[in-house]
Image: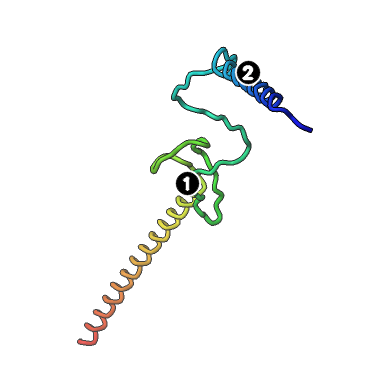
């Protein structure tokens, strides 16, 4: 099958015409009369809300533990609200001190009683020592006579 020069050029110009028409249509709808929404660019915050479940951990945190008290229950009476940012020296927690305060008072009273007994014994020893010294002096005086 033989194709003539005239039919080749007709096909070439026909194809070239289709390409030119397609290019004109693309250019027209791309740059002129476009119905696409547009927005003028501005510099501002770009917020992306994230909704998720989980647990956050602080970058810098310090663990606070309950003081150890043998035989005593530790109860919290006041506590800083959860999530509050605190600095060194700020109030964190207050424990109930009534039980330990009562124990301290009882032990202070016991100490006072023991000290009183000690002073009584010291006075008795001093009195006995003076009696013994007096008896010794009498015995020495008797011996000398």
The answer to which of 77 and 49 lies nearer the viewer is 49
Front one among 58 and 33: 33
Residue shown at 38%/60% (left/top)? 115
Depth check: give the residue in front, 83 or 71.
83
Horizontal placement of 89 versus 74: left or right?
Answer: left
Q: Residue at x 58, y 32 (%)?
A: 50
Seen at 44% across and 24% down, the residue is 43
Q: Quadrant of the N terminus?
A: top right
Coordinates of residue 125 in the picture (x, y in percent): 34, 70
The quarter of the rendered structure image containing the C terminus is bottom left
Residue 88 place in picture, x, y as percent: 39, 43
Q: Nearest to the eye among marks 2 and 1: give it.
A: 2
- Circle 2 SS class: helix
Q: Which mark is residue 61?
A: 1
User: Of the residues under marks 2 and 1, which one precedes in the sequence?
Assistant: 2
Q: Position of residue 73 (x, y in %)?
A: 56, 49
In the rendered structure, the answer to whether residue 143 lies left or right of residue 101 reads left
Secondary structure at badge 1 equals: loop
For mark 2, what is the residue?
21
Per the rendering, the mark at residue 127 is: none
């Amino acid at each position: 099958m033989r194709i003539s020069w005239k039919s080749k050029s007709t096909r070439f110009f026909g194809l070239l015409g289709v390409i030119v028409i397609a290019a004109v249509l693309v250019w027209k709808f791309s740059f002129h009369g476009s119905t696409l929404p547009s927005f003028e660019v501005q510099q501002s915050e770009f917020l992306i809300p994230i909704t998720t479940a989980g647990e956050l951990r602080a970058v810098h945190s310090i663990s606070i533990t309950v003081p150890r008290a043998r035989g005593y229950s530790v109860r919290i009476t006041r506590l800083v609200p959860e999530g509050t940012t605190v600095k060194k020296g700020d109030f964190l927690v207050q424990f109930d001190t009534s039980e330990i305060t009562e124990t301290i008072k009882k032990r202070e009273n016991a100490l006072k009683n023991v000290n009183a007994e000690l002073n009584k014994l010291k006075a008795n020893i001093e009195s006995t020592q003076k009696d013994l010294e007096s008896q010794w002096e009498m015995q020495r005086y008797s011996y000398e006579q």
